[in-house]
Amino acid sequence: MSDFIAMASQYTGLIYATLALGLSLAIYFAFQYQINFWWLNFWYSIPFVGKLARLSRDTTRSSNSGWLRAEETLCSDYRKHITTTSELEFRKRLTYMSKAQDLGRHPHPGWMVAVLALLLVAEGLGFSYLLGTWMAREGSANVHTLLMLAIVFVICTIMLFLTHAAGHQLYRTGLIKRSDKEWRDSGQEKPLRTQEVKLDDDQAVDDAAPAFTQTVNRVGTHGSHVMVVITAIAVIAIAGVSTWMRVNHLNQEMIERTAVQGTSSGDGNPFTSDKPSIPAELAKPQQEADMTARAESLSNEKGEGLAAFIMLALIFVVTQIVSIYAGYKYGFAGKESAAAYRGTRGYATYDDYMDRFEPMIQVGQAKLQTLQRNLSALGGNFRLSLTKTFDDFIRDAEARRRSRREATWVFSTSAIQPTVAATPIAVPEAVTLQEALARIGVLTTAAERKAYVATLPETLKEQVIEHRKAERQREEQERKAAQQKDLDELF
């Protein structure tokens, strides 16, 4: 252990640099979205050599009507960081997470991952140094240091993965078992699972089913504890082996120290010291007292070492329990709940969701206006139409994406390339209710939706009409509930 302390003091700078790098990476991944947008804005704001300054010298017109290439480039760069979704899609994602019982949960915070990693590294440094020493008995201190760092990295990575997977499996399996129990308690009148509901499906398709059925439709019906068992075995094995190695290392140090002290003590030889020799009869009581004191000192030191090693093992086990709890508390059980969460960015209401992007939209609009002023000053005799706004670009981008999605849907269902958007397309008999509703959702005008419904088979047409009626009634009920809530808050 003393060798490890001396090595740690020798490489203090390297250890600090590694910790600083790890902390920096944790901060970046925790605030990646904000940092990337700040860097884009900074790069555009640099005078003379920044991207805004370079775009201010480009008056080339774009292929899109009314846009200059410089305007389009600027808006595209800022648009990459402002990925908004419609209110309908936002509510669909919230409904998916709610039915999967993931509403209110979120991924691991970056700071928690960093803290757990630091705890694992700090606890495993001593054990890793012993392993590195045994792996290269004749190696130098530098070789031992490299092996120690490699072992610490491997152990930290493996344990973080195992504990997170075990915690997540505990939560998901517990949710499935609870749903199964509720189904059995209800009498098992209907199947536990009616169908697999994906994020892109209509989330109202199983509204009539019990809550436990809605959950397993999105989570699944098969749970397992395999990762929990593997993690428990790994934790017990690492804690036991590390404690055993530390105890043996301590015993070896005690033996070496006893041997050195035994050879260095006087044995009555007159040639070993300048002092006159003492008769054995007089020296024996003192020697016995010294040996007794030395034995008690070594015994106490060994007891303290054993207590310290037991405490280290307990700290390691408790750290893994905390990591497993983090995996249980954070993360999602639904198969597509993570994607749904990314679509909502963790916000509970659509207004809060849009408020997040409003300052960024204002920044993009300000940069666009600056670019337009620079282009107007550069234009001279050129007549430039600089009336576009950042909101115009967002609307145009959404319209192009909707058009591509519609064209893709037509191609996949009809196997023909659409030429005229308003031309009615025959719907084959194999179209399901979900496909019909998805098609209606991408049509932009009421005339197009009516023309499409008219092409549906009679049975499917009735199902679509009934679904639309139920949807309208639900929207009306939500509107009345919102009005009542406003009245209650105001009066």
Image (spheres, grey):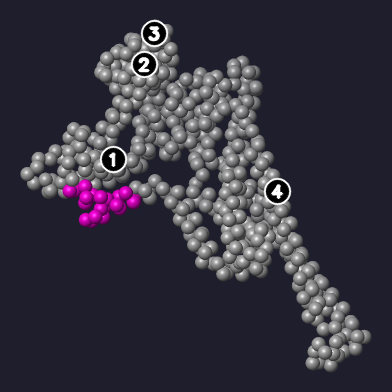
Q: Whole-Å distance between the Cαs marked 1 and 4?
A: 53 Å
- Which residue is pictured at 76% across the width and 72% down the height? 257
Q: Is residue 42 above or below residue 298?
A: above
Q: Which mark is residue 414?
A: 2
Q: Nearer the viewer, mark 3 or mark 2?
A: 2
Mark 2: give few (<14), some (14-19) or many (20+) Cα within 10 Å: some
Question: Is 84 colored magenta in this rendering?
Answer: no
**From which residue to which does the magenta span run?**
38-57
**Label 3 belongs to which residue?**
457
Mark 3 touches mark 1? (CB < 8 Å): no
Residue type at mark 3 is Pro
Q: Element under label 1?
A: helix
Q: Nearer the viewer, residue 92 or 258?
A: 258
Which of the two labelled residues, at mark 3 and mark 1, occupies the earlier sequence position? 1
Q: Whole-Å distance between the Cαs marked 2 and 1?
A: 33 Å
x%, y% of residue 129?
A: 64, 61
Q: Whole-Å distance between the Cαs marked 3 and 2?
A: 16 Å
Q: Which mark is residue 236?
A: 4
Q: Is residue 20 left or right of residue 3?
A: left
x%, y% of residue 141?
A: 61, 66
- Quarter of the image holding residue 395? top left
